[in-house]
Image (tube, rainbow, N blue to C red):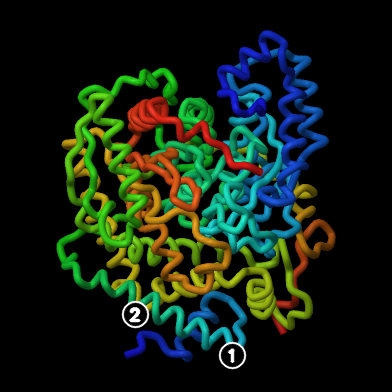
Amino acid sequence: MSLFDHKLTEIQSMIERKEVSIPDLVDESFKRIAAVDGDVKAFLALDEEHARKQAEEAQAAGKTGILSGIPIGVKDNIVTKGLRTTAASQILHNFDPIYDATVVNKLREAGTITVGKLNMDEFAMGSSTENSSFQKTRNPWNLAHVPGGSSGGSAAAVAAGEVPFSLGSDTGGSIRQPASFCGVVGMKPTYGRVSRFGLIAFASSLDQIGPITRNVEDNAHLLEAIVGVDPYDSTSANVPAENFAAGLTGDIKGLRIAVPKEYLGEGVSEEVRQSVLAALKVLEGLGATWEEVSLPHSKYGVATYYLLASSEASSNLARFDGIRYGYRAEGAENLIDLYKKTRAEGFGDEVKRRIMLGTFALSSGYYDAYYKKAQQVRTLIKKDFEDVLENYDVIIGPTTPTPAFKIGEIIDDPLTMYANDILTIPVNLAGVPGISVPCGFAENGLPLGLQIIGRHFDEKNVYRVAHAYEQATDFHKEKPKL
Amino acid sequence: MTRISEEQVRHVAHLARLAVTDEEVHTFTEQLDAIITFAEQLNELDTSNVQPTSHVLNMKNVLRKDESAPGLDREEVLKNAPDQQDGQIRVPSIIE
Protein backbone atom coordinates (compact mmCIF):
# COMPACT_ATOMS: atom_id res chain seq x y z
CA MET A 1 0.00 0.00 0.00
CA SER A 2 1.25 3.46 -0.90
CA LEU A 3 1.19 6.46 1.43
CA PHE A 4 -0.84 8.18 -1.27
CA ASP A 5 -3.67 5.66 -0.89
CA HIS A 6 -4.54 7.56 2.28
CA LYS A 7 -6.64 10.66 2.07
CA LEU A 8 -5.17 14.01 3.06
CA THR A 9 -6.59 14.13 6.59
CA GLU A 10 -5.17 10.66 7.27
CA ILE A 11 -1.74 11.63 5.96
CA GLN A 12 -1.77 14.71 8.18
CA SER A 13 -2.67 12.62 11.26
CA MET A 14 0.17 10.26 10.39
CA ILE A 15 2.53 13.26 10.25
CA GLU A 16 1.21 14.51 13.60
CA ARG A 17 1.71 11.07 15.15
CA LYS A 18 5.21 11.06 13.64
CA GLU A 19 4.52 7.86 11.73
CA VAL A 20 5.65 9.55 8.55
CA SER A 21 7.63 12.71 7.86
CA ILE A 22 7.33 15.25 5.07
CA PRO A 23 10.65 14.01 3.57
CA ASP A 24 9.06 10.51 3.53
CA LEU A 25 6.16 11.83 1.45
CA VAL A 26 8.44 13.52 -1.05
CA ASP A 27 10.64 10.42 -1.14
CA GLU A 28 7.59 8.26 -1.86
CA SER A 29 6.78 10.49 -4.79
CA PHE A 30 10.27 10.38 -6.35
CA LYS A 31 10.60 6.63 -5.76
CA ARG A 32 7.32 5.98 -7.50
CA ILE A 33 8.29 8.29 -10.37
CA ALA A 34 11.58 6.40 -10.74
CA ALA A 35 9.69 3.10 -10.76
CA VAL A 36 6.83 3.86 -13.17
CA ASP A 37 7.37 7.08 -15.10
CA GLY A 38 9.53 5.32 -17.67
CA ASP A 39 6.28 3.63 -18.72
CA VAL A 40 3.73 6.33 -17.95
CA LYS A 41 5.82 9.32 -19.12
CA ALA A 42 3.74 11.85 -17.20
CA PHE A 43 6.53 14.22 -16.16
CA LEU A 44 8.39 16.65 -18.43
CA ALA A 45 10.63 18.06 -15.69
CA LEU A 46 11.45 17.15 -12.09
CA ASP A 47 12.59 19.50 -9.35
CA GLU A 48 14.02 16.84 -7.03
CA GLU A 49 16.85 18.61 -5.26
CA HIS A 50 14.74 21.68 -4.49
CA ALA A 51 11.71 19.58 -3.45
CA ARG A 52 13.78 17.45 -1.06
CA LYS A 53 15.30 20.59 0.46
CA GLN A 54 11.83 22.12 0.89
CA ALA A 55 10.65 18.92 2.55
CA GLU A 56 13.49 19.05 5.10
CA GLU A 57 12.73 22.71 5.82
CA ALA A 58 9.00 22.06 6.16
CA GLN A 59 9.65 19.16 8.52
CA ALA A 60 11.95 21.35 10.65
CA ALA A 61 9.40 24.19 10.70
CA GLY A 62 6.61 21.88 11.87
CA LYS A 63 3.13 21.34 10.49
CA THR A 64 1.26 24.51 9.58
CA GLY A 65 -1.79 23.61 7.51
CA ILE A 66 -3.72 20.77 5.96
CA LEU A 67 -1.75 20.88 2.70
CA SER A 68 1.69 21.41 4.20
CA GLY A 69 4.28 18.96 2.95
CA ILE A 70 2.05 17.37 0.31
CA PRO A 71 3.82 16.62 -3.00
CA ILE A 72 2.11 18.04 -6.05
CA GLY A 73 2.63 18.00 -9.81
CA VAL A 74 1.83 21.04 -11.92
CA LYS A 75 0.69 21.06 -15.53
CA ASP A 76 3.37 22.50 -17.76
CA ASN A 77 1.30 25.49 -18.92
CA ILE A 78 1.38 26.98 -15.40
CA VAL A 79 4.51 29.07 -14.91
CA THR A 80 6.89 28.16 -12.10
CA LYS A 81 9.76 30.52 -11.30
CA GLY A 82 13.11 28.99 -12.27
CA LEU A 83 11.50 25.65 -13.16
CA ARG A 84 11.33 25.00 -16.91
CA THR A 85 7.84 25.60 -18.31
CA THR A 86 7.22 24.66 -21.94
CA ALA A 87 3.46 24.13 -22.40
CA ALA A 88 4.81 20.99 -24.14
CA SER A 89 5.84 23.17 -27.10
CA GLN A 90 9.12 23.37 -28.97
CA ILE A 91 8.64 27.14 -29.09
CA LEU A 92 9.15 27.29 -25.29
CA HIS A 93 11.65 24.40 -25.06
CA ASN A 94 14.20 26.50 -23.17
CA PHE A 95 11.89 28.81 -21.19
CA ASP A 96 12.57 29.34 -17.48
CA PRO A 97 9.87 31.63 -16.04
CA ILE A 98 10.93 34.57 -13.91
CA TYR A 99 7.77 34.64 -11.80
CA ASP A 100 5.27 32.19 -10.35
CA ALA A 101 1.62 31.86 -11.38
CA THR A 102 -0.83 33.03 -8.70
CA VAL A 103 -1.92 29.42 -8.06
CA VAL A 104 1.72 28.45 -7.52
CA ASN A 105 2.14 31.29 -5.01
CA LYS A 106 -1.00 30.15 -3.23
CA LEU A 107 0.21 26.55 -3.11
CA ARG A 108 3.50 27.69 -1.64
CA GLU A 109 1.62 29.59 1.08
CA ALA A 110 -0.40 26.44 1.74
CA GLY A 111 2.83 24.46 2.02
CA THR A 112 2.61 21.95 -0.86
CA ILE A 113 5.86 20.84 -2.46
CA THR A 114 6.11 20.91 -6.26
CA VAL A 115 7.91 17.80 -7.49
CA GLY A 116 7.75 18.54 -11.22
CA LYS A 117 5.93 19.62 -14.35
CA LEU A 118 3.41 17.47 -16.15
CA ASN A 119 3.02 16.64 -19.82
CA MET A 120 0.07 17.91 -21.87
CA ASP A 121 -1.06 18.54 -25.40
CA GLU A 122 0.93 21.45 -26.81
CA PHE A 123 -0.62 24.68 -25.46
CA ALA A 124 -3.49 22.52 -24.09
CA MET A 125 -4.79 21.88 -27.61
CA GLY A 126 -5.86 18.28 -27.77
CA SER A 127 -7.73 15.47 -26.06
CA SER A 128 -5.06 12.76 -25.84
CA THR A 129 -1.71 14.35 -24.84
CA GLU A 130 -0.42 12.98 -28.17
CA ASN A 131 0.13 16.57 -29.30
CA SER A 132 2.99 17.11 -26.84
CA SER A 133 6.19 18.12 -28.65
CA PHE A 134 8.24 15.98 -26.29
CA GLN A 135 6.63 12.66 -25.36
CA LYS A 136 3.42 10.65 -25.35
CA THR A 137 1.98 10.01 -21.90
CA ARG A 138 0.32 6.61 -21.50
CA ASN A 139 -2.77 5.56 -19.59
CA PRO A 140 -1.69 3.84 -16.35
CA TRP A 141 -4.62 1.39 -16.69
CA ASN A 142 -3.45 0.21 -20.11
CA LEU A 143 -0.26 1.61 -21.58
CA ALA A 144 -1.50 1.16 -25.15
CA HIS A 145 -4.23 3.75 -24.51
CA VAL A 146 -4.12 7.53 -24.20
CA PRO A 147 -4.54 9.19 -20.78
CA GLY A 148 -6.83 11.80 -22.34
CA GLY A 149 -5.95 15.46 -22.56
CA SER A 150 -4.95 18.04 -22.54
CA SER A 151 -4.05 17.52 -18.84
CA GLY A 152 -3.03 13.91 -19.57
CA GLY A 153 0.17 14.06 -17.53
CA SER A 154 -1.69 15.55 -14.55
CA ALA A 155 -4.31 12.78 -14.52
CA ALA A 156 -1.90 9.92 -15.29
CA ALA A 157 0.56 10.97 -12.55
CA VAL A 158 -2.21 10.91 -9.92
CA ALA A 159 -3.66 7.62 -11.19
CA ALA A 160 -0.20 6.02 -11.20
CA GLY A 161 0.43 7.12 -7.60
CA GLU A 162 3.38 9.34 -8.56
CA VAL A 163 1.84 12.32 -6.76
CA PRO A 164 -1.34 12.46 -4.68
CA PHE A 165 -2.34 15.82 -6.18
CA SER A 166 -1.88 17.73 -9.40
CA LEU A 167 -3.10 20.87 -11.09
CA GLY A 168 -4.54 20.84 -14.58
CA SER A 169 -6.32 23.36 -16.77
CA ASP A 170 -9.63 22.94 -18.56
CA THR A 171 -10.69 24.90 -21.65
CA GLY A 172 -13.11 22.39 -23.20
CA GLY A 173 -12.77 19.36 -20.92
CA SER A 174 -9.02 19.16 -20.38
CA ILE A 175 -9.29 18.33 -16.65
CA ARG A 176 -12.49 16.26 -16.64
CA GLN A 177 -11.83 14.08 -19.72
CA PRO A 178 -8.36 12.86 -18.62
CA ALA A 179 -9.65 12.41 -15.05
CA SER A 180 -12.40 10.20 -16.50
CA PHE A 181 -9.96 8.24 -18.72
CA CYS A 182 -7.55 7.69 -15.80
CA GLY A 183 -10.10 6.92 -13.06
CA VAL A 184 -9.39 9.95 -10.85
CA VAL A 185 -11.31 13.02 -9.65
CA GLY A 186 -10.99 16.23 -11.69
CA MET A 187 -12.74 19.54 -11.06
CA LYS A 188 -13.20 22.42 -13.47
CA PRO A 189 -14.27 25.30 -11.25
CA THR A 190 -16.62 28.13 -12.24
CA TYR A 191 -14.98 30.51 -14.72
CA GLY A 192 -13.38 33.24 -12.59
CA ARG A 193 -13.05 31.13 -9.41
CA VAL A 194 -9.30 30.63 -9.84
CA SER A 195 -6.85 33.24 -11.07
CA ARG A 196 -5.44 32.60 -14.54
CA PHE A 197 -2.38 34.80 -13.92
CA GLY A 198 0.60 32.70 -14.96
CA LEU A 199 -1.49 30.20 -16.90
CA ILE A 200 -0.16 30.28 -20.46
CA ALA A 201 -3.31 31.45 -22.23
CA PHE A 202 -5.12 29.29 -24.79
CA ALA A 203 -8.70 30.63 -24.85
CA SER A 204 -8.99 33.30 -22.18
CA SER A 205 -12.79 33.30 -21.91
CA LEU A 206 -12.84 29.52 -21.27
CA ASP A 207 -9.56 28.54 -19.53
CA GLN A 208 -9.76 27.59 -15.87
CA ILE A 209 -7.22 25.91 -13.55
CA GLY A 210 -8.44 23.09 -11.30
CA PRO A 211 -7.37 20.18 -9.08
CA ILE A 212 -6.93 16.49 -9.92
CA THR A 213 -6.86 14.07 -6.97
CA ARG A 214 -7.63 10.47 -5.98
CA ASN A 215 -10.77 11.38 -4.00
CA VAL A 216 -13.39 14.12 -3.73
CA GLU A 217 -12.53 15.31 -0.23
CA ASP A 218 -8.88 15.97 -1.14
CA ASN A 219 -10.03 17.74 -4.29
CA ALA A 220 -12.19 20.09 -2.19
CA HIS A 221 -9.25 20.91 0.08
CA LEU A 222 -6.97 21.64 -2.86
CA LEU A 223 -9.51 23.89 -4.60
CA GLU A 224 -10.06 25.88 -1.42
CA ALA A 225 -6.33 26.70 -1.38
CA ILE A 226 -6.20 28.13 -4.91
CA VAL A 227 -9.43 30.16 -5.30
CA GLY A 228 -9.89 33.90 -4.93
CA VAL A 229 -9.83 37.27 -6.64
CA ASP A 230 -6.45 38.37 -7.97
CA PRO A 231 -5.43 41.91 -8.92
CA TYR A 232 -3.31 40.37 -11.72
CA ASP A 233 -6.35 38.72 -13.35
CA SER A 234 -9.20 41.14 -13.97
CA THR A 235 -11.50 38.21 -14.86
CA SER A 236 -11.06 36.58 -11.46
CA ALA A 237 -14.25 36.89 -9.45
CA ASN A 238 -14.53 38.56 -6.09
CA VAL A 239 -16.21 35.59 -4.45
CA PRO A 240 -14.86 34.56 -1.04
CA ALA A 241 -13.07 31.22 -0.56
CA GLU A 242 -15.27 28.55 0.97
CA ASN A 243 -14.61 25.54 3.12
CA PHE A 244 -15.83 23.16 0.42
CA ALA A 245 -14.87 20.08 2.47
CA ALA A 246 -17.19 21.15 5.31
CA GLY A 247 -20.14 20.55 3.00
CA LEU A 248 -19.31 16.88 2.45
CA THR A 249 -21.99 15.49 4.69
CA GLY A 250 -22.98 12.48 2.61
CA ASP A 251 -26.56 13.76 2.82
CA ILE A 252 -28.23 14.41 -0.52
CA LYS A 253 -31.83 13.72 0.47
CA GLY A 254 -34.22 15.75 -1.67
CA LEU A 255 -31.54 16.55 -4.28
CA ARG A 256 -33.09 17.30 -7.69
CA ILE A 257 -30.98 15.93 -10.55
CA ALA A 258 -31.43 16.85 -14.21
CA VAL A 259 -30.25 14.31 -16.79
CA PRO A 260 -29.99 15.84 -20.28
CA LYS A 261 -31.29 13.44 -22.91
CA GLU A 262 -28.57 14.74 -25.25
CA TYR A 263 -25.98 13.33 -22.83
CA LEU A 264 -27.24 9.75 -23.10
CA GLY A 265 -28.15 9.77 -26.76
CA GLU A 266 -26.42 9.30 -30.09
CA GLY A 267 -22.65 8.87 -29.98
CA VAL A 268 -22.55 7.81 -26.34
CA SER A 269 -21.49 4.17 -26.00
CA GLU A 270 -23.84 1.68 -24.37
CA GLU A 271 -21.49 0.81 -21.52
CA VAL A 272 -21.05 4.51 -20.71
CA ARG A 273 -24.84 4.96 -20.75
CA GLN A 274 -25.36 1.97 -18.46
CA SER A 275 -22.72 3.20 -15.99
CA VAL A 276 -24.52 6.55 -15.71
CA LEU A 277 -27.94 4.91 -15.25
CA ALA A 278 -26.41 2.71 -12.52
CA ALA A 279 -24.96 5.82 -10.85
CA LEU A 280 -28.38 7.49 -10.92
CA LYS A 281 -29.80 4.44 -9.12
CA VAL A 282 -27.15 4.82 -6.42
CA LEU A 283 -28.06 8.50 -6.04
CA GLU A 284 -31.77 7.62 -5.89
CA GLY A 285 -30.93 5.17 -3.12
CA LEU A 286 -29.43 8.11 -1.21
CA GLY A 287 -32.68 10.07 -1.47
CA ALA A 288 -32.17 12.05 -4.68
CA THR A 289 -34.64 12.21 -7.55
CA TRP A 290 -33.85 12.60 -11.24
CA GLU A 291 -35.71 13.64 -14.35
CA GLU A 292 -34.83 13.77 -18.01
CA VAL A 293 -34.37 17.31 -19.36
CA SER A 294 -33.07 18.85 -22.57
CA LEU A 295 -30.09 21.08 -23.28
CA PRO A 296 -31.31 21.66 -26.84
CA HIS A 297 -28.22 23.46 -28.15
CA SER A 298 -25.69 20.88 -26.92
CA LYS A 299 -25.08 19.54 -30.39
CA TYR A 300 -23.78 22.94 -31.49
CA GLY A 301 -21.23 23.03 -28.66
CA VAL A 302 -18.28 21.53 -30.51
CA ALA A 303 -18.58 23.85 -33.54
CA THR A 304 -19.09 26.90 -31.31
CA TYR A 305 -16.14 25.94 -29.18
CA TYR A 306 -13.70 25.37 -32.05
CA LEU A 307 -14.51 28.74 -33.59
CA LEU A 308 -14.28 30.68 -30.32
CA ALA A 309 -11.34 28.85 -28.73
CA SER A 310 -9.30 28.92 -31.94
CA SER A 311 -10.03 32.62 -32.46
CA GLU A 312 -8.90 33.44 -28.95
CA ALA A 313 -5.86 31.18 -29.36
CA SER A 314 -4.79 32.83 -32.61
CA SER A 315 -4.66 36.11 -30.71
CA ASN A 316 -3.07 34.74 -27.51
CA LEU A 317 -0.37 32.81 -29.36
CA ALA A 318 0.69 35.87 -31.35
CA ARG A 319 3.13 36.59 -28.51
CA PHE A 320 5.31 33.63 -29.46
CA ASP A 321 7.44 35.38 -32.03
CA GLY A 322 11.03 34.42 -31.21
CA ILE A 323 11.90 37.87 -29.91
CA ARG A 324 11.77 38.03 -26.12
CA TYR A 325 11.92 34.39 -25.03
CA GLY A 326 11.72 30.84 -26.28
CA TYR A 327 12.81 29.39 -29.60
CA ARG A 328 14.16 31.63 -32.37
CA ALA A 329 14.73 30.32 -35.89
CA GLU A 330 18.16 30.68 -37.49
CA GLY A 331 18.95 32.40 -40.75
CA ALA A 332 16.00 34.81 -41.02
CA GLU A 333 16.49 37.65 -43.49
CA ASN A 334 14.25 40.22 -41.86
CA LEU A 335 11.83 40.59 -38.97
CA ILE A 336 8.70 39.22 -40.68
CA ASP A 337 10.74 36.28 -41.95
CA LEU A 338 11.99 35.68 -38.39
CA TYR A 339 8.42 35.56 -37.06
CA LYS A 340 7.25 33.22 -39.79
CA LYS A 341 10.17 30.80 -39.56
CA THR A 342 10.21 30.77 -35.76
CA ARG A 343 6.49 30.00 -35.58
CA ALA A 344 6.62 27.45 -38.40
CA GLU A 345 9.45 25.56 -36.69
CA GLY A 346 8.28 26.10 -33.12
CA PHE A 347 4.58 25.13 -33.28
CA GLY A 348 3.21 21.63 -33.88
CA ASP A 349 0.53 20.70 -36.42
CA GLU A 350 -2.56 20.97 -34.20
CA VAL A 351 -1.50 24.36 -32.84
CA LYS A 352 -0.90 25.64 -36.37
CA ARG A 353 -4.27 24.28 -37.50
CA ARG A 354 -6.08 26.15 -34.71
CA ILE A 355 -4.12 29.37 -35.26
CA MET A 356 -5.09 29.15 -38.93
CA LEU A 357 -8.76 28.47 -38.14
CA GLY A 358 -8.88 31.30 -35.59
CA THR A 359 -7.12 33.77 -37.88
CA PHE A 360 -9.58 32.88 -40.63
CA ALA A 361 -12.65 33.23 -38.35
CA LEU A 362 -11.47 36.66 -37.19
CA SER A 363 -10.40 37.91 -40.61
CA SER A 364 -12.11 40.69 -42.48
CA GLY A 365 -15.23 39.48 -44.26
CA TYR A 366 -15.64 36.33 -42.13
CA TYR A 367 -15.85 37.74 -38.61
CA ASP A 368 -19.66 38.08 -38.51
CA ALA A 369 -20.33 34.76 -40.22
CA TYR A 370 -18.11 32.68 -37.94
CA TYR A 371 -16.81 34.40 -34.81
CA LYS A 372 -19.84 36.54 -33.97
CA LYS A 373 -22.23 33.74 -34.92
CA ALA A 374 -20.41 31.41 -32.50
CA GLN A 375 -20.63 34.03 -29.74
CA GLN A 376 -24.39 34.22 -30.29
CA VAL A 377 -24.78 30.44 -30.13
CA ARG A 378 -22.73 30.54 -26.94
CA THR A 379 -25.46 32.73 -25.46
CA LEU A 380 -28.05 30.06 -26.33
CA ILE A 381 -25.92 27.26 -24.82
CA LYS A 382 -25.38 29.26 -21.63
CA LYS A 383 -29.11 29.90 -21.38
CA ASP A 384 -29.84 26.15 -21.73
CA PHE A 385 -27.82 25.54 -18.56
CA GLU A 386 -29.34 28.50 -16.70
CA ASP A 387 -32.89 27.35 -17.52
CA VAL A 388 -32.28 23.79 -16.31
CA LEU A 389 -30.37 24.84 -13.19
CA GLU A 390 -33.25 27.10 -12.18
CA ASN A 391 -35.30 23.99 -11.43
CA TYR A 392 -32.64 21.42 -10.57
CA ASP A 393 -29.68 21.36 -8.16
CA VAL A 394 -27.22 19.60 -10.47
CA ILE A 395 -26.97 18.22 -13.99
CA ILE A 396 -25.55 14.71 -14.34
CA GLY A 397 -24.28 12.78 -17.33
CA PRO A 398 -21.17 10.99 -18.57
CA THR A 399 -17.87 12.89 -18.81
CA THR A 400 -16.94 11.31 -22.15
CA PRO A 401 -18.86 9.32 -24.79
CA THR A 402 -16.38 6.40 -24.64
CA PRO A 403 -13.53 5.11 -22.46
CA ALA A 404 -9.91 5.96 -23.40
CA PHE A 405 -9.05 5.20 -27.01
CA LYS A 406 -5.77 3.73 -28.25
CA ILE A 407 -2.65 5.80 -28.87
CA GLY A 408 -2.57 6.70 -32.57
CA GLU A 409 -6.17 5.64 -33.14
CA ILE A 410 -7.71 9.02 -34.05
CA ILE A 411 -4.79 11.45 -34.07
CA ASP A 412 -5.05 12.04 -37.84
CA ASP A 413 -8.76 12.86 -37.71
CA PRO A 414 -9.28 16.28 -36.05
CA LEU A 415 -13.09 16.21 -36.15
CA THR A 416 -13.37 12.80 -34.45
CA MET A 417 -10.85 13.95 -31.85
CA TYR A 418 -12.89 17.12 -31.26
CA ALA A 419 -16.09 15.07 -30.83
CA ASN A 420 -14.54 13.47 -27.76
CA ASP A 421 -15.22 16.69 -25.86
CA ILE A 422 -18.89 16.94 -26.84
CA LEU A 423 -20.09 16.45 -23.23
CA THR A 424 -17.54 18.71 -21.53
CA ILE A 425 -17.33 21.68 -23.93
CA PRO A 426 -20.81 23.15 -23.20
CA VAL A 427 -19.85 23.44 -19.51
CA ASN A 428 -16.93 25.72 -20.39
CA LEU A 429 -19.06 27.75 -22.78
CA ALA A 430 -21.61 28.29 -19.97
CA GLY A 431 -18.85 28.93 -17.40
CA VAL A 432 -20.42 26.64 -14.78
CA PRO A 433 -18.43 24.20 -12.57
CA GLY A 434 -18.16 20.50 -13.44
CA ILE A 435 -16.44 17.53 -11.85
CA SER A 436 -15.62 14.03 -13.10
CA VAL A 437 -15.66 11.16 -10.58
CA PRO A 438 -14.98 7.46 -11.27
CA CYS A 439 -18.23 5.57 -11.96
CA GLY A 440 -17.14 2.14 -13.16
CA PHE A 441 -15.10 0.31 -15.74
CA ALA A 442 -15.59 -0.56 -19.38
CA GLU A 443 -15.41 -4.16 -20.55
CA ASN A 444 -11.77 -3.62 -21.53
CA GLY A 445 -10.96 -2.60 -17.93
CA LEU A 446 -10.58 1.14 -18.58
CA PRO A 447 -12.21 3.61 -16.17
CA LEU A 448 -15.41 5.57 -16.81
CA GLY A 449 -16.34 8.96 -15.35
CA LEU A 450 -19.53 10.56 -14.10
CA GLN A 451 -19.86 14.29 -14.75
CA ILE A 452 -21.67 16.45 -12.18
CA ILE A 453 -22.38 20.04 -13.19
CA GLY A 454 -23.64 22.83 -10.92
CA ARG A 455 -24.65 26.49 -10.87
CA HIS A 456 -22.09 29.30 -11.11
CA PHE A 457 -20.01 29.36 -7.90
CA ASP A 458 -21.89 26.38 -6.45
CA GLU A 459 -18.83 24.09 -6.26
CA LYS A 460 -19.79 23.25 -2.68
CA ASN A 461 -22.93 21.51 -3.87
CA VAL A 462 -21.14 19.78 -6.76
CA TYR A 463 -18.60 18.40 -4.29
CA ARG A 464 -21.35 17.31 -1.89
CA VAL A 465 -23.05 15.22 -4.57
CA ALA A 466 -19.75 13.83 -5.92
CA HIS A 467 -18.66 12.84 -2.42
CA ALA A 468 -21.97 11.20 -1.49
CA TYR A 469 -21.80 9.14 -4.70
CA GLU A 470 -18.13 8.25 -4.18
CA GLN A 471 -18.74 7.09 -0.60
CA ALA A 472 -21.62 4.88 -1.74
CA THR A 473 -19.42 3.13 -4.36
CA ASP A 474 -16.00 1.46 -4.44
CA PHE A 475 -14.72 2.51 -7.87
CA HIS A 476 -12.32 5.11 -6.45
CA LYS A 477 -10.58 2.40 -4.42
CA GLU A 478 -9.44 0.52 -7.54
CA LYS A 479 -5.92 1.21 -8.72
CA PRO A 480 -4.12 0.47 -11.97
CA LYS A 481 -1.62 -2.41 -11.85
CA LEU A 482 1.70 -1.02 -12.94
CA MET B 1 -18.49 23.36 -52.84
CA THR B 2 -15.24 24.22 -51.12
CA ARG B 3 -15.38 26.91 -48.46
CA ILE B 4 -11.74 27.85 -48.56
CA SER B 5 -9.15 27.97 -51.35
CA GLU B 6 -5.39 27.39 -51.29
CA GLU B 7 -4.93 31.06 -52.06
CA GLN B 8 -6.97 31.99 -48.95
CA VAL B 9 -4.95 29.58 -46.83
CA ARG B 10 -1.72 31.28 -47.97
CA HIS B 11 -3.22 34.68 -47.09
CA VAL B 12 -4.36 33.50 -43.64
CA ALA B 13 -0.93 31.93 -43.00
CA HIS B 14 0.65 35.29 -43.80
CA LEU B 15 -1.72 37.08 -41.40
CA ALA B 16 -0.88 34.49 -38.73
CA ARG B 17 2.85 34.87 -39.43
CA LEU B 18 3.33 31.19 -40.23
CA ALA B 19 5.66 30.02 -42.98
CA VAL B 20 3.92 27.19 -44.83
CA THR B 21 5.17 24.65 -47.35
CA ASP B 22 3.14 23.76 -50.45
CA GLU B 23 2.30 20.46 -48.82
CA GLU B 24 1.04 22.19 -45.68
CA VAL B 25 -1.09 24.57 -47.75
CA HIS B 26 -2.68 21.56 -49.37
CA THR B 27 -3.33 19.75 -46.06
CA PHE B 28 -4.58 22.87 -44.27
CA THR B 29 -6.94 23.65 -47.13
CA GLU B 30 -8.54 20.22 -46.85
CA GLN B 31 -8.68 20.20 -43.06
CA LEU B 32 -9.89 23.79 -42.63
CA ASP B 33 -12.50 23.20 -45.29
CA ALA B 34 -13.81 20.19 -43.35
CA ILE B 35 -13.83 22.07 -40.05
CA ILE B 36 -15.51 25.15 -41.53
CA THR B 37 -18.11 22.98 -43.29
CA PHE B 38 -18.77 21.32 -39.93
CA ALA B 39 -19.02 24.75 -38.24
CA GLU B 40 -21.64 25.89 -40.72
CA GLN B 41 -24.21 23.77 -38.89
CA LEU B 42 -24.52 26.88 -36.67
CA ASN B 43 -26.42 28.47 -39.56
CA GLU B 44 -29.35 26.17 -38.72
CA LEU B 45 -30.00 28.52 -35.79
CA ASP B 46 -31.68 31.88 -36.15
CA THR B 47 -29.59 34.20 -33.98
CA SER B 48 -30.81 37.52 -35.37
CA ASN B 49 -32.09 38.64 -31.95
CA VAL B 50 -29.42 36.99 -29.80
CA GLN B 51 -26.73 39.02 -28.04
CA PRO B 52 -23.19 37.62 -28.44
CA THR B 53 -21.46 36.31 -25.28
CA SER B 54 -17.79 37.16 -25.00
CA HIS B 55 -17.55 36.52 -21.29
CA VAL B 56 -19.81 34.54 -18.94
CA LEU B 57 -19.67 36.65 -15.79
CA ASN B 58 -21.49 39.93 -15.31
CA MET B 59 -18.35 41.90 -14.82
CA LYS B 60 -17.09 45.06 -16.43
CA ASN B 61 -14.57 47.85 -15.97
CA VAL B 62 -12.42 46.29 -13.29
CA LEU B 63 -10.48 49.28 -12.01
CA ARG B 64 -7.55 49.75 -9.68
CA LYS B 65 -5.59 52.75 -8.41
CA ASP B 66 -3.00 54.01 -10.87
CA GLU B 67 0.04 53.44 -8.67
CA SER B 68 3.55 52.66 -9.80
CA ALA B 69 5.12 49.39 -8.73
CA PRO B 70 8.45 47.77 -9.54
CA GLY B 71 8.46 45.85 -12.83
CA LEU B 72 10.47 42.78 -13.72
CA ASP B 73 14.22 42.97 -13.29
CA ARG B 74 15.97 43.61 -16.62
CA GLU B 75 18.75 41.08 -16.07
CA GLU B 76 16.19 38.43 -15.19
CA VAL B 77 14.10 39.23 -18.27
CA LEU B 78 17.11 39.05 -20.57
CA LYS B 79 17.98 35.55 -19.37
CA ASN B 80 15.25 34.19 -21.63
CA ALA B 81 16.04 36.40 -24.62
CA PRO B 82 17.43 34.49 -27.62
CA ASP B 83 19.80 37.33 -28.53
CA GLN B 84 20.84 40.44 -26.63
CA GLN B 85 23.29 43.30 -26.60
CA ASP B 86 23.94 46.13 -24.13
CA GLY B 87 20.97 45.22 -21.95
CA GLN B 88 18.56 45.11 -24.88
CA ILE B 89 16.96 42.38 -26.97
CA ARG B 90 18.52 42.11 -30.43
CA VAL B 91 16.45 41.45 -33.58
CA PRO B 92 17.30 41.35 -37.30
CA SER B 93 17.34 44.70 -39.06
CA ILE B 94 13.87 46.18 -39.53
CA ILE B 95 14.77 49.06 -41.86
CA GLU B 96 16.74 48.38 -45.05
- Amino acid carrying mark 1 in the image: Asp
**Is residue A266 shown to the viewer in this render?**
yes
A418 up-or-down from B95: above or below: above
A441 up-or-down from A113: above or below: below
> Which secondary structure, mark 1?
helix
- In the picture, the quarter occupied by the N terminus of chain A is top right
Q: Residues within 10 Å of mark 1 (few under 14, many from 20)?
A: few
Do badges 2 and 1 share one subunit?
Answer: no
| Residue tagged 1 | B22
Percent of width and height locating residue B32: 44, 79
Residue for point 62% across, 69% down: A347
Chain for disc number 1: B
Task: Pick the residue in front: A417 or A190.
Answer: A417
> Which of the numbered marks, if any, corresponds to residue A365?
2
Q: CA distance from mark 2 to mark 1?
A: 25 Å
- Amino acid carrying mark 2 in the image: Gly
Percent of width and height locating residue A469: 36, 30
Residue for point 77% across, 36% down: A31
